[in-house]
Image (cartoon, helix red, strand yellow):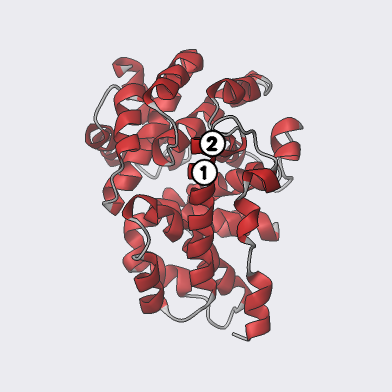
């Protein structure tokens, strides 16, 4: 690929700064941690768009600290998906990545693909047809996260949803939007709760699910903040727990455990991270493709039902 084109695809590291984004600032440790998460995503993205081959990419991604590595794999997913689109004569990078070393981070990779859908404003129906029928919905989650992270005044304050989002995708978009609240509100529990309260009630469950996932996967807060999160979520604790269980499963598959994920699962799920991940596996094993609902929602609902009993 020509050097000029590569340069045009770069994203400045300053785009992840709280000051640049206008995110809520109340805890310097949380701020620094979440900025590092964003920077790690961009590291993976920029490693991918260099287009130097998957072996080189694998080496570079595996240099990232284990706890943060999933974010680099996510960024690489975005980069490879973007290259596939702009160089249609060579559009198997993402497929080979998912079939190879990227498979262990498949959840994060699909989320990264969603950033491309958001940035290029591409229709989601065709994209979903090309992705895994279950996990491909995570790309829509990534779409929602992107809109909240980069366009929070429109997506969070004004609660706007892109025209491309409709049907069940609307709900998955909100799950990603909920994840973005963890960053936009600086992991401040009161701010997150207030933001969700301002949305119509029908959107609350999916937003809380996203918050639970971000809390457990990204982290950045202490035990008291997580306990506070569980308290303010009230009737949406099963959604919080389901999000945390997703985070546990993503880390288990990638073999990149984190103390904050373990802590979040203990508080939000009432279980160890390993046990929470097992619940997602058990629910997934009971999914059949002929369901009238999207398989992804059947999966989530069964996990939440389990935590309705547990929590």
Instruction: Note whether residue 175 is visible.
Output: yes
Q: CA distance from mark 1 to mark 2?
A: 6 Å
The image's mark for residue 202 is: none
Position of residue 180 relative to residue 199, above or below, is below
State yes or no: discs 1 and 2 in contact (Cβ < 8 Å).
Answer: yes
Front residue (pair 169, 274): 274
Which residue is drawn at the image coordinates 32% and 54% (left, top)? 66
Q: Residue furthest front?
A: 28
| Residue 186 falls in image quadrant | top right
State left or right for residue 53 relative to residue 191.
left
Front residue (pair 5, 187): 187
Front residue (pair 52, 297): 52
| Residue 244 falls in image quadrant | top left
Position of residue 38 relative to residue 99, above or below, is above
Q: Residue furthest bottom?
A: 2
Which residue is drawn at the image coordinates 39% and 66% (left, top)? 61
Which residue is drawn at the image coordinates 51% and 27% (left, top)? 208
Q: Position of residue 193 (x, y in %)?
A: 58, 21
SS for dot 1: helix
* Mark 2 closeness class: few <14, some 14–19, many ≥20 residues within 10 Å: few
Q: Position of residue 291 (x, y in %)?
A: 42, 38
Q: Name the quadrant of the N terminus.
A: bottom right
Residue receiving disc 1:
32
Q: Position of residue 109 (x, y in %)?
A: 45, 57
Instruction: Note whether residue 165 is visible.
Output: no
Position of residue 82 relative to residue 277, above or below, is below
Residue receiving disc 2:
28
Q: Position of residue 188 (x, y in %)?
A: 55, 27
């Amino acid at each position: 690929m020509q050097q000029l084109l590569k340069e045009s695809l770069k994203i400045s590291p300053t785009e992840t700064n709280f000051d640049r984004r206008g995110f809520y600032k109340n805890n310097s440790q949380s701020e620094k941690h979440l900025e590092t998460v964003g920077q790690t995503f961009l590291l993976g993205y920029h490693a991918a768009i260099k287009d130097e081959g998957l072996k080189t990419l694998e080496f570079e991604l595996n240099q990232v600290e284990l706890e943060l590595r999933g974010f680099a794999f996510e960024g690489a997913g975005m980069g490879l998906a973007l290259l596939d689109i702009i160089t249609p004569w060579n559009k198997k990078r993402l497929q080979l990545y998912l079939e190879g070393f990227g498979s262990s981070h498949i959840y994060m990779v699909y989320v990264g693909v969603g950033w491309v859908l958001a940035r290029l404003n591409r229709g989601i129906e065709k994209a979903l047809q090309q992705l895994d029928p279950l996990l491909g919905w995570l790309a829509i989650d990534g779409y929602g996260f992107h809109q909240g992270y980069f366009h929070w005044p429109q997506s969070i304050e004004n609660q706007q949803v892109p025209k491309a989002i409709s049907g069940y995708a609307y709900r998955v978009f909100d799950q990603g939007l909920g994840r973005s609240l963890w960053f936009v509100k600086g992991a401040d529990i009161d701010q997150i709760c207030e933001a969700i309260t301002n949305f119509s009630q029908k959107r609350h469950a999916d937003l809380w699910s996203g918050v639970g996932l971000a809390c457990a996967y990204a982290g950045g807060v202490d035990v008291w903040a997580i306990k506070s999160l569980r308290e303010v979520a009230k009737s949406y604790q099963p959604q919080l727990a389901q999000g945390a269980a997703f985070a546990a499963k993503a880390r288990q598959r990638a073999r990149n455990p984190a103390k904050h994920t373990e802590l979040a699962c203990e508080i939000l799920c009432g279980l160890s991270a390993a046990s929470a991940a097992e619940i997602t596996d058990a629910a997934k094993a009971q999914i059949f493709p002929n369901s009238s609902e999207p398989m992804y929602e059947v999966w989530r609902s069964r996990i939440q039902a389990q935590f309705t009993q547990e929590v």
